[in-house]
Amino acid sequence: MKTDPIYIFRKTWATYQKVISNNLMFHKEILTAVKKLLESRLEPINVLDLGCGDATHIGKVLNPGQVAEYCGCDLSPYALDVARNNLEPFGIRVNLLCRDMVAVLKEAPENHFDVVYFGYALPPVDQ
C-alpha cells in the first residue's frame, strides 16, 4: 500500500468527488440554498469557508463581482493547492489557510465575514 500523501489525497478525493457527483449527501440542495443566499446580497461579501477542500463546490455558486474576499481553511495542503487554482478565475482576494477550522473561526475578526460556509467537514471532537 502506498503511503505517499499526494497519492492518498488523490485516491480519497476521487472517492469523495463520486459521493458528491451522485448527490449522496445532498450537496446540490445545500449549494442551491447557498447560491440563493449569496444572490440576495446587493454588495460584494466576505466569505469564510470552513473545511473548503478544493473549493470546487463553493466555486459553482459564486459569480464574478459577488465576493470581495474568500478565506478558506482545510487541513489538506494538497486540497488547498487545487482550491487556489479553482478560485483563480474569480479574480478575488483569496486567503487559504492550512489550519484547524475551529481555531480559524475563533480567531476570525468579529463581523468581518458576511457568510460562513461549513459543508460536510467535521471539526475535532475535543473542541
Image (cartoon, rainbow, N blue to C red):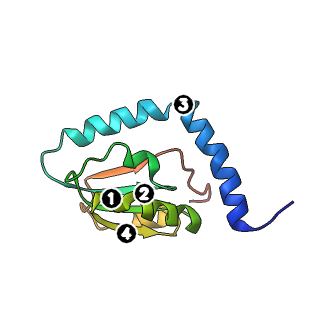
Spatial CA distance of label 3 from label 1 is 25 Å
Q: Secondary structure at mark 4?
A: strand
Q: Which residue is mark 3?
A: 23
Q: Amino acid at mark 3?
A: Asn
Label 2 with label 1: CB-CB less than 8 Å? yes
Q: Position of residue 73 (x, y in %)?
A: 46, 63
Q: Residues within 10 Å of mark 2 (few under 14, many from 20)?
A: some
Q: Is residue 60 above or below residue 104?
A: above
**First in residue order: circle 1 vs circle 4:** 1
Spatial CA distance of label 2 from label 1 is 7 Å
Q: Amino acid at mark 2?
A: Asn
Q: Secondary structure at mark 1?
A: helix
Question: Residue at the spot x=47%, y=45% of the render?
Answer: 119
Q: Nearer the viewer, residue 14 or 69?
A: 14
Spatial CA distance of label 3 from label 2 is 21 Å
Q: Amino acid at mark 1?
A: Pro
Question: Residue at the spot x=87%, y=60% of the render?
Answer: 1
Q: Residues within 10 Å of mark 3 (few under 14, many from 20)?
A: few
**First in residue order: circle 4 vs circle 3:** 3
Question: Residue at the spot x=42%, y=57% of the render?
Answer: 86
Q: Position of residue 41 (x, y in %)?
A: 17, 44
Q: Residues within 10 Å of mark 4 (few under 14, many from 20)?
A: few
* Outermost residue toward the left in this view: 42
Label 2 with label 4: CB-CB less than 8 Å? no
Q: How many numbered badges does the structure rendering display?
A: 4
Q: Which residue is mark 2?
A: 86
Spatial CA distance of label 2 from label 4 is 13 Å
Q: Dividing the picture into quarters, in which one does residue 24 lie?
A: top right
What is the number of the mark on residue 95? Answer: 4
Spatial CA distance of label 4 from label 3 is 28 Å
